[in-house]
Image (tube, helix red, strand yellow):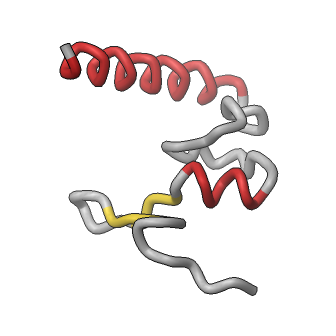
Amino acid sequence: MKRLQEKIDFYYNEQGYVVLTEKYLLDRGYCCGNGCLHCPYDYENVPEHKKAALRAARKAREEDSDSEKR
């Protein structure tokens, strides 16, 4: 198994948790269903009751990011 590289495959958030990058998740090749922050698969394997909340949170983050760029 390939050794993960910090800042390429993962990073540590402000709370010290490991966050997997979109690159790593794409390389893995499927949605694990855990609701990963950078899930490139639109949370396809996440239970429906949790999926809507994750999608809404992602949309809010994207809108915040867009407004900061202006």
Q: How many marks?
A: 0
> Where's residue 12, x and y in %?
33, 66
Residue 1 falls in image quadrant: bottom right
Q: Is residue 48 above or below residue 27?
A: above
- Residue ID at (19%, 21%): 68
- 64 vs 6, left or right, is left
- Residue ID at (45%, 59%): 19
Residue 70 falls in image quadrant: top left
> Where's residue 55, x and y in %?
54, 22
Residue 24 falls in image quadrant: bottom right
- Residue ID at (22%, 21%): 69
- 12 vs 10, left or right, is left
Q: Is residue 8 above or below residue 59?
A: below
Q: Residue reaching furthest front?
A: 70
Q: Is residue 14 above or below residue 1?
A: above
- 11 vs 34, left or right, is left
Q: Nearer the viewer, residue 20 or 32?
A: 20
